[in-house]
Image: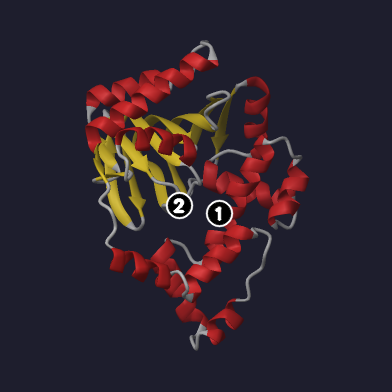
Amino acid sequence: MAVSQHIWHCGAGLPGDVLIADLRAYRYAPHFHDAWSIGAVEQGRCDFTVQGESHAANAGDLVVIAPGQVHTGGTSAGPLAYRMAYIDPAWFQDHERALYAQGARFAGPVIADPGLCGRWLEALAPEDIPPARGRERISAALFGLLAAHAKAREAMPADESASESADMDDVCALLRQRMAADPACAPDLETLAQAQDRHRTTLVKQFARRYGLPPQAWLRNWRVARARALLRAGLPLADAAQAVGFADQAHLTRVFKQIYGSTPGVLARADASDSQTVRLRGVSIR
């Protein structure tokens, strides 16, 4: 049971990474990213969930997962090879708004389009080409995806918009906002629940239904996402762990590996050399 990963970076102008994965009986625990995850399946079948719903992607399919959407991934039968781009939301939005003024949406996370999948596989190949050329290929592939499979997002009715705004005042949204603003915080769930005349267990269940993970699991994932950004900015591992609220760098490393399938050291070496290959062996994550 192992995963082989090759990580490379798109260069200046596209904050994000490209992951090339070759999995054998390996599954990722539920997690989310703070970037758009756009993957092209080269071989095998990926069985995964997004926001609790089950999906399957086969060779020739694309997978599109929005920032913040809790998902799993991996394979339990046969080899799985795919390439995944983690695209900064602002860079994605620049492309999205060029085609759809009100924004765009996809019908689902799996898109069956072998021709476009081939374009993405080519765009995400770790070839020795200038960074600008790599960004051009990914940009063209992203425009192709949006043009062929996205639909214009309808403007939200005024009453619905007002309802959503009011909804953001509830305790679940408040809790998420606090944790997002300060990953190092340790929220007092008991006090928050009591302030809304709720039981702590009720608050935890309501939060999990809305955001896909219980509060503490959501916070762990968010801490790793923020630590990843700090590490890419050059902060030492121990300092990044402290900044986002982990007990120490060993704790950050354990959770980081559960979510990303590799250690923070792999990311650091990839930053230093533009690419890094690692093979991990051990018990698959369920």
Q: Position of 266 compared to 129: left or right?
A: right
Q: Is residue 206 above or below residue 233?
A: below
The numbered dot on residue 221 is 1
Give whichever of discs 1 and 2 has the lower sequence position: 2
Q: Residues within 10 Å of mark 2 (few under 14, many from 20)?
A: some
Quarter residue 163 falls in: bottom left
**For mark 2, what is the residue?**
68
- Under mark 1, the amino acid is Asn
Q: Position of residue 259 (x, y in %)?
A: 53, 47
What secondary structure is marked by label 1? helix
Determine the secondary structure under disc 2. loop
For residue 33, side relative to residue 275 (left or right): left
Looking at the picture, does residue 95 appear above or below residue 10?
below
Q: Residues within 10 Å of mark 1 (few under 14, many from 20)?
A: many
Q: Is residue 25 above or below residue 72?
A: above
Image location (x, y in percent) of residue 140: 36, 22
